[in-house]
Image (spheres, grey):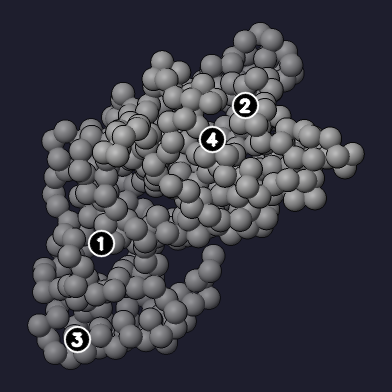
Amino acid sequence: MRQSSLFTKTRKDAPKDEVSKNAQLLIRAGYIHKEMAGVYSYLPLGLHVQENIKRIVREEMSAIRGQELIMTALQRKELWESTGRWDDSVVDVWFKSELKAGGEVGFGWSHEEPIGEMMKNYLASYKDLPVSVYQFQTKLRNEMRAKSGIMRGREFIMKDMYSFAADEATHLAYYESTKPAYMNVFKRLGIGDDTFITFAAGGAFTKFSHEFQTVCEAGEDIVYLNREKGIAINEEVLTDETLESLGVTREELTKTATAEVGNIFNFGQQKATDLGLTIKDAEGKSIPVWMGSYGIGITRLIGVLVEKFSDEKGIVWPEAVAPFLVHLVALNTDDANVRDFADGMYESLKKRGVSVLYDDRDARGGEKFADSDLLGMPYRVIISKRAQEEGQFEVVTRKTGEVQKLNEETLLGFFTTDEDD
Ligand code: ATP
Ligand code: MG
């Protein structure tokens, strides 16, 4: 993409009321726009990042036979009443509204009830199972605190998946299979080494649920962590009983600030019992379905990546999520030769399938470099009059600052080999 055609511009300062680093950097770089506290629009560059994350999540969910769908934002009051979760004293994040035609609706803060209800139409027998469905949905939650930028939104994108099984063994096996699938996602996003499967509060059916907690200063959670043993316990369940059942001592664990990037929840047959979602088993007996739910905070992840991968100059995107792999920065563009050459380089890289943001603007070098640092593409290629004359082009790695000088041919091949890392 040509930067001259990008409508967003970088800015020196973030809005005064924006206190979180992730939102400050993303706003300054033009990835997001703040509508109000906890509510952010995703601009073209931000949408690229979002889509890159979704693609990775999609691949990993398909690999455990997840089928993608999309549910509605408007939800029926009566359905949530039937499970006792319509009342604000039970669920404190509801946004609700009234229909002009009469009746109340809620805005989806979760889709457990609607998905379970919808499935009644398709699941009749054990032969219809197992099934796993997922979606990328904008969730609406009337959160009290919204101080962590995009890490805690009142409107945010979640990947939520729901599994349905006819027997406990199949159900538990599926629940377990989501753990490596989730870890694959986090590895591919570059936070695998810092993300831990964490024991957290369970529900009616299980003692614990599992959260995926990423070490992050700006996170809102506290976990007690032992990296070597790979054990993490959310402080909300840190009791002597928990320590004993997991075979660790308090001394072995380090109190650590983290952000919850995902969680998985085993409902057993409880949820289906509440919903009246039953099937006929092999003996023709009616039984409630075994269910699990599995969330990933897509937009929270973007915030976590920015918090973890940024420096005083700006964002440092991991390759897997960067909106473009290469930032091609052309200097001396008033010289027609240089401009033609840079245009040619842009076309050649694109032809090879390299994703490129091409800074073809008429601006000073200093400004272009500062913008490039702020935007944070993994590699910067500099085209200047001198570089063109010498036939040597600088490739700067954003993460390390390493500078390599390559000739035209090597440069063109440089990104195609690394491309699908
Ligand atoms: P939290 O404990 O952070 O409030 P939660 O336990 O309510 O989250 P779920 O409702 O299970 O989370 O949502 C699944 C995932 O969605 C979470 O693991 C988190 O990554 C993300 N998420 C939850 N609430 C928000 C929010 N307000 N803004 C952005 N992401 C969120
Ligand atoms: Mg939580």
- Residue that badge 4 annotates: 113
The Cα atoms of the two marked residues, 3 and 2, are separated by 69 Å
Closer mark to the observer between disc 4 and disc 1? 4
- Residue that badge 2 annotates: 274
- Residue that badge 3 annotates: 338
Which sits earlier in the primary sequence, circle 4 or circle 1? 4
Query: For residue 129, which numbered disc appears in the image?
Result: none
The Cα atoms of the two marked residues, 4 and 3, are separated by 60 Å
The Cα atoms of the two marked residues, 3 and 1, are separated by 19 Å
Quadrant of the rendering where the C terminus is positioned? bottom right
Which sits earlier in the primary sequence, circle 4 or circle 3? 4
Q: Amino acid at mark 4?
A: Glu
Helix, strand or loop for disc 3? helix
Q: Is mark 4 within 8 Å of ligand 1?
A: no
Identity of the residue drawn at 26% across and 57% down: 43
Left or right, 276 with reference to 350: right
- Residue that badge 1 annotates: 372
Q: Amino acid at mark 2?
A: Asp
